[in-house]
Amino acid sequence: MDEKARALMAAKSAAGFQAADMVEDGMVIGLGTGSTVYYMIERLSARVREGLHVTGVPTSFQTAMRAREYAIPLTTLDDHPIIDMAIDGADEVDPHLNLIKGRGAAMTREKCVAAAAFQFIVVVDEAKVVSRFAAPVPVEILPFAVTPVVAQLRGLGCRPVIREGVKKDGPVITDNGNFIVDCTFPSIADPAGLEKAMAEIPGVVESGLFCGYANKITVIVGNEKGIKKITSADIVP
């Protein structure tokens, strides 16, 4: 493993471990999807073995499999429509604590879980904290409406590309049975407005823009030396 990869692993584990240590006994927590969250699950599992009582709501089949492997009890939003905390990663975090998520194609369930939580803990390495969004915005769409949806997304000013699978021919299929379109914009001046515009397109299930959660977000930024936290109190008007 080269030095850069080692530093990234240290950053992700520092952020994930810190998030796991914020979980309190008896909490119901949302378990996000992604590599940084898996470090959190590893640490949370150790705390469960030490006697912590916690129940998780997984945001993907992959996370559910990982949580079971680590003996973390699971539940659903049907049984717990309001949860104490959601812990998840992000592709990018801007200065207003807006997020782009969806590299793991799980953003629809992740948004449901984040909306249900009192606290939203976002774990990232420092490269994910940006001054302005530049990452593609993933959009989950119904296969039935792929052609008109892609045309309308293009009309919003992006270059939409249907995400294709690795070691699989054809489109990525989400846990909900839908397609993912990755939308690359020259710039995103109004993330909240874009999120709303995408949501209004018939056939769009959900986008990877997470705006309007700043009042309950704590971003834990990891690097090889440790972590720092960013909350709404740190937002510059």
Image: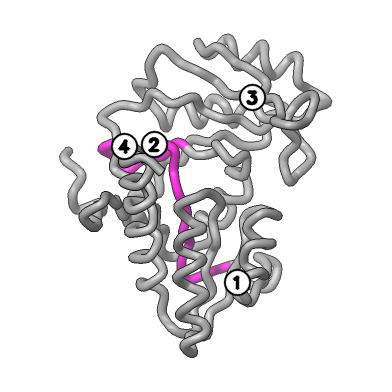
Classify the position of the N terminus by image quarter: top left
Which residue occupies 38% across, 23% down?
A: 134
In the picture of the structure, the residue carrying the numbered disc 4 is 127
Residue in view at x 62 percent, y 44 percent: 106
Label 3 or label 1, whichever comes before in sequence order:
1
Front residue of 230/47: it is: 47
The 10 Å Cα crowd at callout 4, few under 14, some 14 to 19, many 20 or more, is: some
Disc 4 versus disc 1: distance between alpha carbons? 28 Å
Name the image quarter holding the C terminus.
Answer: top left
At label 2, the amino acid type is Glu
* Figure label count: 4
- First in residue order: circle 4 vs circle 2: 2
Marks 4 and 2, how far apart at CA: 8 Å
Visible residue check, residue 215: no
Image point (62%, 55%), residue name: 59
Q: Name the residue carrying label 2.
A: 92
What residue type is disc 4 on?
Ala
What amino acid is found at the position of numbered circle 1 in the picture? Tyr
Q: Earlier in the sequence, mark 3 or mark 4?
A: 4
Q: Which residue is mark 1?
A: 70
